[in-house]
Image: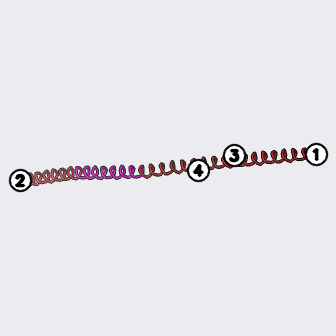
Amino acid sequence: ISQLQYNMTQQSKTYNETLSNMTIAHDKRIHDMQTQHHDQQVQTMNEAYEIERNVQRDMEQLKKDVNVIIEDTNKKAQLEYERVTKSAQEEVDRIVEDVDRQLLDKEKVIAEL
């Protein structure tokens, strides 16, 4: 009987050790999976932040480029406005001179009469 009790005690110890080892292994596996999942989440978040930073940088550069284009267009428009205004003023001056000359000619004709 004592041999049987000893064997059963040994089997119980072995069973408890096996169960304990399985529980430890299971807990470790769950912990590893949680850690891996967390690491993947962190990596995904880091990638998202990197994409967001790149988009922000690209948008800032685009704003700068657009502002340069607007400034260049405004300068060209101003130069064209000045050119057209100057040309129109020169045409008006020519017409005024022509009218003045015609008036002088008519005054001479009238004076001769």
Of tags 1 and 4, the one toward the viewer is 1
Which residue is drawn at the image coordinates 77% and 48% (left, top)? Answer: 20
Residue 96 point in image, percent of width and height: 18, 53
Q: What amino acid type is highlighted by mark number 2? A: Glu
Q: Which residue is mark 3?
A: 29
Q: Which residue is mark 1?
A: 1
The earlier-in-sequence mark between 1 and 3 is 1
The earlier-in-sequence mark between 4 and 2 is 4
State the residue in front, 105 or 48. 48
**What distance separates the C-alpha of mark 3 from that of mark 2?**
123 Å
Q: Are marks 1 and 3 in contact (CB under 8 Å)?
A: no
Residue 80 point in image, percent of width and height: 28, 49
What segment is highlighted magenta in the picture? 62-87
Residue 28 point in image, percent of width and height: 69, 48
Q: Residues within 10 Å of mark 4 (few under 14, many from 20)?
A: few
**What distance separates the C-alpha of mark 1 from that of mark 3?**
41 Å
Q: Which residue is mark 4?
A: 42
Q: Is residue 96 left or right of residue 108?
A: right
Q: What amino acid type is highlighted by mark number 3? A: Arg
Which residue is drawn at the image coordinates 57% and 47% (left, top)? Answer: 44
Checking the image for residue 72, the label placed there is none
The earlier-in-sequence mark between 1 and 4 is 1
**What distance separates the C-alpha of mark 2 from that of mark 1?**
164 Å
Q: What amino acid type is highlighted by mark number 4? A: Val
Q: Is residue 77 left or right of residue 96?
A: right
Of tags 3 and 4, the one toward the viewer is 3
Of tags 1 and 3, the one toward the viewer is 1
**What distance separates the C-alpha of mark 4 from that of mark 2?**
104 Å
Of tags 3 and 2, the one toward the viewer is 3
Q: Which residue is mark 2?
A: 112
